[in-house]
Amino acid sequence: MPAYKAPVEDVLFLLNDVFAIERYNNLPGFGDATPDVVEAIVAEGAKLCEDLFAPLNRVGDQEGCTRRTDGTVTTPTGFKEAYRAYVEAGWMGLSAPPEYGGQGLPTTLNTVMQEFVSSSNLALGMYPGLTQGAIAALVVHGTEEQKRTYLPKMVEGAWTGTMNLTEPHCGTDLGLIRTKAVPNGDGSYAITGTKIFISAGEHDMAENIVHLVLARIEGAPQGTKGITLFVVPKVLVGPDGALGERNGVSCGSIEHKMGIHGNATCVMNYDGAQGWIVGQENRGLNAMFVMMNEARLAVGVQGLALSEVAYQNAVTYAKERLQGRALTGPKAPDKPADPIIVHPDVRRTLLSIKAFNEAGRALLLWTSLKSDVAHRSGDEKERQSADDHMGLMTPIVKGVLTDRGFDNAVKAQQMFGGHGYIEESGMSQFVRDARIPMIYEGANGIQAMDLVGRKLGKDGGRAVMTFFNEVGAFCEENAGDEALKGYVAPLKEGLSQLQQATLWFMNNALAKPDNAGAGAYDYMHLFGLVAMGYMWAKIARAATDKKKLGNGVGERMDAKLLTGRFYMERMLPETGTLFTRIQAGSDAAMSIPVEMF
Ligand SMILES: Cc1cc2nc3c(=O)[nH]c(=O)nc-3n(C[C@H](O)[C@H](O)[C@H](O)COP(=O)(O)OP(=O)(O)OC[C@H]3O[C@@H](n4cnc5c(N)ncnc54)[C@H](O)[C@@H]3O)c2cc1C
């Protein structure tokens, strides 16, 4: 059975040494997050995931969810109890506002916990994960009454949340939504329609489910400008907050799918269900974007999380499995063969996952800290700059971390040879589970289009210029440091290619949009490589400084520096290929007639 150990040391190194979390002490919630508190929270979260969530991962995969004839859904054995333990320990409200019962701690700590949860049991973690997204949307766009009615129960974990966008004929293009809303004359609306693929749409973990639903009010304009967001509880809530009658929403069926079997993916039928507008009429996408952006980052976390757990198991196996001899002569002469970790190709595989995981985690924590600044800083300029960063990085985190997360799960499975293909190894589940984050929350091709089509040019390119300036300044400042030469020079080269690719789009995509569409995916990955290269350079800076202080951390810091060197020498140079592909433009892709496919 696969094992999982939460990367506590790495998280603390990133928070304390690379990003100096104490610098943010002036932000609300950070004052309470002293180094001791952070360490205790991270250790406690690790324990819950290792001891309770991870052992249920396989159970969830094998049992899946069951829909009964009365429309109720039963989750796998142990899920309900594990969820209860999670909410009773206060994890749901870790960074939620204190006025609704949350602890108000940094979102960054929640991101850390999301990683541990998703590594140990992705399917189980999605139930609270979606609830946290729904909480965020209601905090920003809910009326005071809606906040009072729903948030305390959701923060407590007694009620969970969902997001209902997708319909049978409408996925990426939400302008096609048909679910309709008719005014009831009392301020509420009757919602009718079918939503599909709704994660956690029905289950047995909570006494109520708060659905956030996109629908079109009768007579509203066609397209995305006629969509409104509604809150539709599974069980109606009385004025005193007590649960009343069942609302007209039910689970028609659940999907049988490739992975995340423990999460109920539901067809939800709305049959005149009572719902209330969240935010403004016809501005539903705007309101839903709060939840979607939260969810996109959380899905990026899922990509990293599966890469991490798959890696851990691959390393254990590679140290134990005896096959062949090292090219340079036996390394375990007392044994019939050497462990496969002696082979350069096995090391290449493992290191490419490790180097991604550590930089990916850094990128996530850096972005989460910006999210905290964007939501909590009293300084408008600071908030705006952090918000720019979030907008720019969201498609990169979602698209790159989930693409690579899946690739890495496959690579880790490869380390097991044929045994990885056998279900018992557990590696197959990681591969199957890692496939969905590339698709939901906007398929990755759409993330790339969002980056190139919307984010690059936004506010005159302010966000991307800030990123270029920051990385450029880091390279300048550290150019003279001999210890960092192997990190700074390749980063500078990667940055230059990213800048040239950006310029190429400016010169070649405005008049010919297909050039943007055809190169967007490569650009997203080029950006991701450089962003993670920057993370490695920052890690190398911190590791070099920490090594000088001694304290017995030398070996751990050497491991960082060597892994970072692998990234710089073997992974970052992929930017060259991506840049070449971008410059090829769209002609080859677009000139072939449809009938020739
Ligand atoms: C397990 C699971 C859980 C899910 N959970 C939820 C949930 O909780 N709530 C919810 O609302 N939805 C959920 N979804 C739905 C999911 O978000 C959609 O499947 C996804 O957004 C893609 O929509 P689609 O399947 O209709 O694909 P389509 O929109 O039909 O797209 C098909 C392909 O075409 C590409 N494509 C489409 N348009 C363009 C374009 N303009 N440019 C370039 N490429 C394009 C896409 O990238 C994709 O690769 C879930 C799906 C699954 C499988």
Image (spheres, helix red, strand yellow):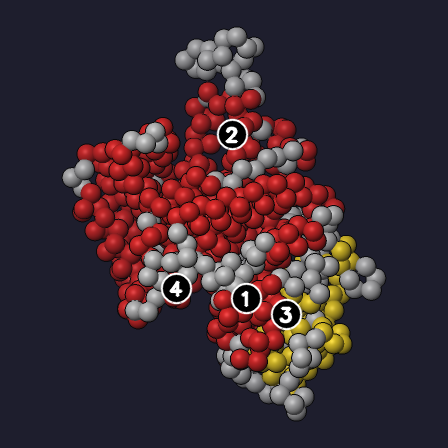
From this viewpoint, which residue is outermost toward the top?
Answer: 334
Q: Please tell me whether mark 3 sits on a helix, a strand or a loop.
A: strand
Q: From the viewer's side, name the closer residue of 157 and 469.
A: 157
Separation of residues labelled 4 and 2 (CA atoms):
40 Å
Which residue is located at x 53 percent, y 47 percent?
45
Residue position marked by numbered label 3 in the rendering? 211
Q: From the viewer's side, name the closer residue of 210 and 355.
A: 210
Decide: few, some or many residues near mark 3? Use Cα within 10 Å; few <14, some 14-19, many ≥20.
many
* 108 left or right of 205 in image: left
Residue type of the residue flagged with mark 3 = His
Residue type of the residue flagged with mark 4 = Pro
Residue type of the residue flagged with mark 1 = Gly
Which residue is located at x 43 percent, y 32 percent?
351
Decide: few, some or many residues near mark 2? Use Cα within 10 Å; few <14, some 14-19, many ≥20.
many
User: Which mark is drawn over residue 315?
Assistant: 2
Location of the N terminus by quadrant is top right
User: Which mark is drawn over residue 101?
Assistant: 1
Which residue is located at x 65 percent, y 79 percent?
275
Separation of residues labelled 1 and 2 (CA atoms):
41 Å
Indicate the position of residue 543 as horizontal and vertical percent values: 31, 37
User: Which mark is drawn over residue 28?
Assistant: 4
